[in-house]
Amino acid sequence: MNATTQRHPGGASRRAARLGDRIFAGLAKGSGITLLLTMAAVAVFLTVRATLALREDEGNFLTTFEWRTGGEDPEFGIAVLLFGTAASSLIAMLLAVPVAVGIALFLTHYAPRRLAAPIAWLVDLLAAVPSIVYGLWGALYLVPRLTGCYEWLDGAFGWTGVLSYAGAPARSLMTVGILLAVMILPIVTSVTREVFRQTPRATQEAALALGATRWEVVRMTVLPFGRSGIVSASMLGLGRALGETMAVATVLSPSFLIHASLLDSGGGTFAQNIASQFKEADTAGRDALIASGLVLFLLTLLVNGAARLIIARRREYAGAAL
Amino acid sequence: MAKRIDVHGLTAYYGAHKAIEDITMHVEPTSVTAFIGPSGCGKSTLLRTLNRMHEVTPGGRVEGKVLLDNEDLYGPEVDPVAVRRTVGMVFQRPNPFPTMSIYDNVAAGLRLNGIRYRKSELDDIVERNLRGANLWHEVKDRLNRPGSGLSGGQQQRLCIARAIAVEPEVLLMDEPCSALDPISTLAIEDLIDKLKTRYTIVIVTHNMQQAARVSDRTAFFNLPAVGRPGRLIEVDATEKIFSNPSVPDTEDYISGRFG
Amino acid sequence: MTGRLRPPEDPGGEEERLRAAMPPGEPGPTRDLPAGAPGARPPAAPSPAPPGAAPPPAPRPVLRPPRLPRWSLAALLTGSLAVGTAAGLICRLSSHLQWGLIAAAVFVAATFGLTARVEGRRRAADRLAALLVWACFAVAVLPLAALVGETVARGAPGVDGYFLTHSMNGVLSWQHGGGVYHALLGTLEQVLLASLLALPVGLLTAVYLVEYGRGRLAAVVTFFVDVMAGIPSIVAGLFVLSLWITILDLGYSGLAGSLALALLMTPIVVRSTEEMLRLVPNELREAALALGVPKWRTTLRVVLPTCAGGIATGVMLALARIAGETAPILLLVFGTNMINRDPFHGAQSSLPLYVYEQWSFGTEPAYERAWAAALVLIALVMLLNLLARALARWKGPRPGP
């Protein structure tokens, strides 16, 4: 190869070309490595700071119902935050996913064609509305309107304890869950719709030709085909809900207590806690917040990883089936 | 049991495009009718109008009449679901339900009817239809494996088993062998020969020899010009079409002078 | 040629009316609907079991099963609304939402019951599913329409030339007036800086992964891009806060915010660019290489231009995404009421932060400013989105039919 190049009249330009190649490849590879180093720096830095904070913690990081980081004996734990984050995100999922699946079916199989395209487009646009706008709307529009609804829930299901309502403004985990549901609805719908749209036409026609009604076509072909897609879309939504800061910070009235009732004000989430504490926190306090942020990060990674695994399995399956 | 089909003045559209125009013909019960003709002449479209699958395609719409033993499939208040249940269909590419086992694929149509079968009854029906599709011996040991794991020819026979399990009156086949190798094709042709004693069969094929081998009657379609709707040129007994057609176009096509 | 075809027979009107009146599942008595006992078939179908245990014959389909007349659904709807109103009046339910819910529940139940009786279980399930799907749509439209409607209704009056060209300097929270200029400027500068940091790294990393990436390093990079995409924005902000401001003591600035935004933007850019590059057919690369064009020129002159539209779309969407980020900005640029054109020194503001600040003042004039700024923010993000979509339509890869 080398010899051929040198004998060739255009040898010089070839060498220049190879130099260009090497520089370009180096640049590309360098970027990849930069990205790696950045990520490694983030991980190492966060872990070190979090470890420093945990060493100072007088309480149990996992079970303490307290977040006192100033002063001599800092005592803080993530129990309340973990509960609040999990509860609000799960409420959001329970509300948003069935509705999102419904809308996705509506857009792919039920809506008149003329209606479906613009609505799909609108849903995609809504997915881009910044979360602070949802937060503003949640605090000023949703909260006052939910009070009546909660009073009714209290009347009907108050005996369960979970849905009792003391009558304070509706700045509770339930409200946060509802707001998060509205927030993640567009993105979950978007992804689910894409999956449903990929259901092979041939399979759907097979069901139709057997004399299946529209719902039976959906049940026999679209839902089984899209099941893993629904799961991964939900995970994506869950990932967004877990890390959401502003929408929670504006709506929730936080406290370091776990209420039995989801409708009563109080509680907190990881992200909201960081946003509301960082200004008063000193270096040690920020380290404590970093420790909680790291837990949130791991939680998000876990959810995203699960989603990715499901998508990968689906690809294999689709490859075998088609 | 097997029904006669009368097509009368049928025109089918895809949106603004007219795919076939003014088709009038009939299909005899318990026999095989083949549709032949060059690509794009509308033979598959016509086939799909016979069980109202055409209107599933976006923009698909039909004018004219299709009578199934004198009952117009496009009449008012006719339920397309009931039509498709009566007129079964096998597609060009084998399309077993990928998420279902072989067993469930055959039972799929029966389960739709909302009747609860006992396990043993369902087992019998599945076995009978797999035997009917000449597939039983090849799959009896792996009924619970996914249908997508079978070979193309086996998948197509599975689709036929699935289609006949609901006991339709008519079976439409849209180029059922075009995606298959010669041996699988032969197996399907044998099967068609066996099925025609019980069903009215309409088959679209690109393969002239196949039409000659399996069909009793043959309909030849052609395009008058590019972009114009397809038309029925002639329909007659297969021997006549292949030995002594009345229209010169048919002879040109069959002897390979065009198409 | 149609001469040899039999003319169609007269449809038997009497028989059809008979059939239409029959319940589903019963075999029709007419000649075209013979009783469907399996034994009646030709010998090809051996009877599988003794007659007593024979499976119930598949119900012979009737082409014209009994259907509810069209007006019945309208009647049901009217009736349900009446029931809902009556229930609301009698039980003195204050919220009209509850009236609506009662009416909806009654309507769904009645439709299902009636359809099941007249048209059969399958039809009823079909109709129920359709109703639920439409209901899902309605349920989702309500809050989303309320969100957009409320923002426009309360924000639009506040958005004018003055609002867009003035800062909040000297305006107290309970006073009217003031504007969003400083925040708009801050957002634009921060987003621009962030993309200057994120774009080269993101684009080149994607090129590396698709064109050069083989073996372990590429796999590790791919993994870390995924990890990076999972960083919650507040954690990215916290990281920069600790490192940049607390430890390196470089102070609050627009740049600090941009660093966090770049951290969030890079993985989005890598992912979307990677996807687009993979859509470029290999034949194109091979064709160029076969002509003796070196690989780097092939990549720059052939591969990248081919998918430039798609890449630009991805970048625009990433920009829209980070323009609306609030959490890291809240931590890092501190916020100010004055115009600070220099993103490298001193506190700046940004649109999302402005909305949050005005909201937290809790006074009516401040709320008005918050809504107006939210509207400006939505408009900015939508503009970027629409631009991205226009680009995608204009230059992007065409989806298959």
Image (cartoon, helix red, strand yellow):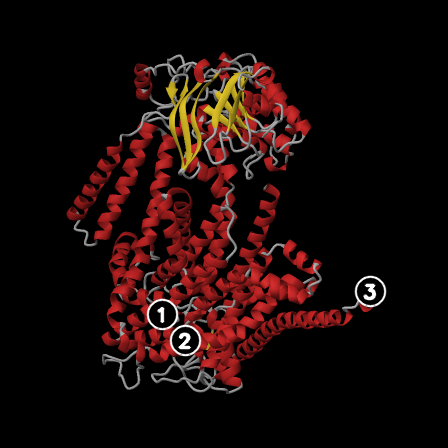
The picture places residue A120, in percent across and down from the top left corner, at 40, 52
In this image, C132 relative to B151: left or right?
left
Question: Badge 2, how many Cα within 10 Å: few under 14, some, many 20+?
Answer: many
Q: What type is the residue that disc 3 sits on?
A: Thr
Q: What type is the residue that disc 1 sits on?
A: Leu
Q: CA distance from mark 3 to mark 2?
A: 56 Å
**Viewer-side residue, C24 vs A48:** C24
Screen quadrant of the C terminus of chain A:
top right
Q: What type is the residue that disc 2 sits on?
A: Thr
Q: Mark 2–mark 1 contact, CB under 8 Å? A: yes
Question: Badge 1, how many Cα within 10 Å: few under 14, some, many 20+?
Answer: many
Residue C377 numbered mark, or none: 1
Q: Earlier in the sequence, mark 2 or mark 1?
A: 2
**Viewer-side residue, B25 vs C280:** B25
Q: CA distance from mark 2 to mark 1?
A: 10 Å
Question: Badge 3, how many Cα within 10 Å: few under 14, some, many 20+?
Answer: few
Secondary structure beneath disc 1?
A: helix
**Viewer-side residue, A71 vs B64:** B64
Residue C49 numbered mark, or none: none
Residue located beneath label 2 in the image: C187
Q: Quadrant of residue B243?
A: top right
Q: Foreground mark, 3 or 2? A: 3
Task: Report whether residue A58 is seen.
Answer: no
Chain letter of disc 3 in the image: A
In this image, B141 relative to A68: left or right?
right
Residue located beneath label 3 in the image: A4
